[in-house]
Amino acid sequence: MSKDAIRQIRETEDQAAVLCRVAEEKAAEMREQVRQKGEEHCALVRESTEAEYAAELTEMRRRATALEAKKRAEAEAEAKVLKAAAREKINEAVKIIVWEIVEKCQ
């Protein structure tokens, strides 16, 4: 081979080495960009998910509070009815108890 051909081969190899380094650097930059975009996307998804669940949790708490208030009102109304019914029968109950005591004592 002539010196000119050998020189061209070496230049071509040098150019190939430079192209490989440039390609590796470009690939590293692209990987970094993709990583950053992935982290940004992950953060956005996390924020939106947290906001969505916070809103759902707020709605569930509101509904639970409303249900609690409704059930409390129902229980209080039922208690009033039972208390009124008990008051109506308290005199009769006292008489029955007293007469049973009197009968047992005789």
Image (cartoon, rainbow, N blue to C red):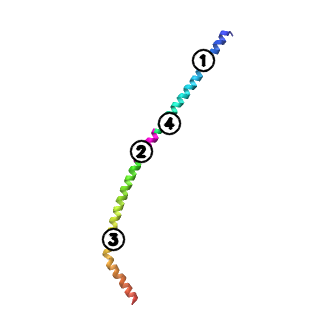
Q: Which residue is mark 4?
A: 39
The Cα–Cα distance between marks 4 and 1, rounded to whole angstroms, is 36 Å
Between residue 92 and residue 72, name the one nearer to us. 72
- Disc 1 residue crowd, few under 14, some 14–19, many 20+, Cα 10 Å: few
Q: Amino acid at mark 2?
A: Glu
The Cα–Cα distance between marks 2 and 1, rounded to whole angstroms, is 54 Å
Q: Position of residue 65 (x, y in %)?
A: 37, 56
Q: Position of residue 104 (x, y in %)?
A: 40, 87
Q: Residue at x 33, y 62 (%)?
A: 73
Q: Reading the chain from its start, which is encountered first: label 2 or label 1?
A: 1
Q: Position of residue 98 (x, y in %)?
A: 36, 83
Q: Reading the chain from its start, which is encountered first: label 4 or label 1?
A: 1
Q: Reading the chain from its start, which is encountered first: label 3 or label 4?
A: 4
Magenta-colored span? 44-55
Q: Amino acid at mark 3?
A: Lys
Q: Which residue is mark 1?
A: 15
Q: Is residue 50 magenta?
A: yes
The Cα–Cα distance between marks 3 and 1, rounded to whole angstroms, is 99 Å
